[in-house]
Image (spheres, rainbow, N blue to C red):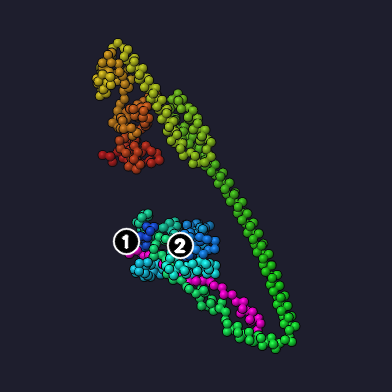
């Protein structure tokens, strides 16, 4: 009987799970209604995802170490496990409960109006978070316990949430998704209807558990009376009882030894796990090294590609023409060879264009010098055998229309008032296209080797040049200028690459 008393008195009233009911979200009947985050919850889509509430965690980001009060949201996103399955991540938060089911019900909001809401049924872990449960009970009594629900995409949709009519920051309706978690809040939620509706005020979770944990006073009294009578009648057998107690001590010592063996086994398991962790760290380092080696190889190949790009871009220029940018070319090649990451090569194309522009500007400058020398030679000649062609260019000095003259290096413009006015200008053939950079005329020019190209008439103030004939038509994709290639118009920006037929312009 004494053992019975001890057994009854030693029963611990371990509080377990506390039932709770939460309004997870408001169903929006008005097609223009959203919560504070711009989400419109459509009933048909909520019903499609309702089964995902079962087993969904109830989380809490605690504001204090005693875990008595929630802070904020605490739900941050998702991760991918080793099998490629996306799972929710609750950083800085703990799972304080679980949902068992959900239903759409008619409830009253904070204004007393009837609304449809998705209600979740579950429980809180009272044994682990007693202070939190007490806080929820107190807050529930005054209607100040708020919640926030999270969603995530499905695996068959690449783990992306599908929205009706696409994603819109101010107005969006999730269509294909699953519910991933709900958080208890002490701050204002995105949905005013998302509050705790019911919570058990009992200290136990269910009748069976309470029955098992409840201290039976009547049983104790009966056992006590019987035990006292037994003790009074068995005083002579005290030695036997002492022996029995000694046997009990021996038994407990055996149990302790068994626990020590169990602890030793667990220590062995921990050692094995630590060894596995160490091996995993070594494997990760090896993979990181392999990744670094691969990155180096990729960078090396990319650098070789960029060096070839430099050579290809400058192949049409003679060594004499490239002399003006010799140092720039060497510097660019050295920088390419020194690159350790692929991303460091992203600006190579723009640097190549800068070098090409510098070479072209020098070519144009030399051409202008040659034309100037031609003009001087023309002015010093005793007579002009070719009949002058009157141009539209007006002399800035005397106001006469300038005429086309021919010199050793080709055509140039001269004032017909020579020798009273000795003003001259280079002669350029206009192509009827405005410069994409400054808006002035684009003219046909030639390199020292006689290769044709197109440049701005205002050079060197404007450095625009193109090997292909530019067009006044703008790219429909990026807005840049386009060039003629046969029967096609091609965007000058290689990264854009937009192409259209010339006939589309007509």
Left or right: where does residue 40 sit relative to residue 308? left
In the rendering, at what x and y percent does residue 194 appear? 41, 65
Q: Do we see residue 48 in this rendering?
A: no
Residue 432 visible in image: yes
* Label 2 SS: loop
Q: Earlier in the sequence, mark 1 or mark 2?
A: 1
Determine which residue is flagged by label 1. Answer: 31
Identify the residue at horizontal 25%, vertical 24% (top origin). 392
Tag 2 residue = 186
Q: Report the quarter where the C terminus lies.
A: top left
| Quarter occupied by residue 3 | bottom right
Percent x, y of residue 105: 38, 70
Residue 26, magenta (yes or no): yes
What is the secondary structure assignment of the residue under circle 1? loop
Q: Position of residue 323 (x, y in %)?
A: 46, 25
Q: Percent from the top left, x then y, of residue 377? A: 34, 14
Looking at the picture, tell me which residue is in the foreground, 134 or 412: 134
Q: Which residues are magenta?
A: 1-29
Picture quadrant where residue 257 is located: bottom right
| CA separation in Å, label 1 and label 2 | 30 Å
Q: Nearer the viewer, residue 246 or 479?
A: 246
Q: Residues within 10 Å of mark 2 (few under 14, many from 20)?
A: many
């Amino acid at each position: 009987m004494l053992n019975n008393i001890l057994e009854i008195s030693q029963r611990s009233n371990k509080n377990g799970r506390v039932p709770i009911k939460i309004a997870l979200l408001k169903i929006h009947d008005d097609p223009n209604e959203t919560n504070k985050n711009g989400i419109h919850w459509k009933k048909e889509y909520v019903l499609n995802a309702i089964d995902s509430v079962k087993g969904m965690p109830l989380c809490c980001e605690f504001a204090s170490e005693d875990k008595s009060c929630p802070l904020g949201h605490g739900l941050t996103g998702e991760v991918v496990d080793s099998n490629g399955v996306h799972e929710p991540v609750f950083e800085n938060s703990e799972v304080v409960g679980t949902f068992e089911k959900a239903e759409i019900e008619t409830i009253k909001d904070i204004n007393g109006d009837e609304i449809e809401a998705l209600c979740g049924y579950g429980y809180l872990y009272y044994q682990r978070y007693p202070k939190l449960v007490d806080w929820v009970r107190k807050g529930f009594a005054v209607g100040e316990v708020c919640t926030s629900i999270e969603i995530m995409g499905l695996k068959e949709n690449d783990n992306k949430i599908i929205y009706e009519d696409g994603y819109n920051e101010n107005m969006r309706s999730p269509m294909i998704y699953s519910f991933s978690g709900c958080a208890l809040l002490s701050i204002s939620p995105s949905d005013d209807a998302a509050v705790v509706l019911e919570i058990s005020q009992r200290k136990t979770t269910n009748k069976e558990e309470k029955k098992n944990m409840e201290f039976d006073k009547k049983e104790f009294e009966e056992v006590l009376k019987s035990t006292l009578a037994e003790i009074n009648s068995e005083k002579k057998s005290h030695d036997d009882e002492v022996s029995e107690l000694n046997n009990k001590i021996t038994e407990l010592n055996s149990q302790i030894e068994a626990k020590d063996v169990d602890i030793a086994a667990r220590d062995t398991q921990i050692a094995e796990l630590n060894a596995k962790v160490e091996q995993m760290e070594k494997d990760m380092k090896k993979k990181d090294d392999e990744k670094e080696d691969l990155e180096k190889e990729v960078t090396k190949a990319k650098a070789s590609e960029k060096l070839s790009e430099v050579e290809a871009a400058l192949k049409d220029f003679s060594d004499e023409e490239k002399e003006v940018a010799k140092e720039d070319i060497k510097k660019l090649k050295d920088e390419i060879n020194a690159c350790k990451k692929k991303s460091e090569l992203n600006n190579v194309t723009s640097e190549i264009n800068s070098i090409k522009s510098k070479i072209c500007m020098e070519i144009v400058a030399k051409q202008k010098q040659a034309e100037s020398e031609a003009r001087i030679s023309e002015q010093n000649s005793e007579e002009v055998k070719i009949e002058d062609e009157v141009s539209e260019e007006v002399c800035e000095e005397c106001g006469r229309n300038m005429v086309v003259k021919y010199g050793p290096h080709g055509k140039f413009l001269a004032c017909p008032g020579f020798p009273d006015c000795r003003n001259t200008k280079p002669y350029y053939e206009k192509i009827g296209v405005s410069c994409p950079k400054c808006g002035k005329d684009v003219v046909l020019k030639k390199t020292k080797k006689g290769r044709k190209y197109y440049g701005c008439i205002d050079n060197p103030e404007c450095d625009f040049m193109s090997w292909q004939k530019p067009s006044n038509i703008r790219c429909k994709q990026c807005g840049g200028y386009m060039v003629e290639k046969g029967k096609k118009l091609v965007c000058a920006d290689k990264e854009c690459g937009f192409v259209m037929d010339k006939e589309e312009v007509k």
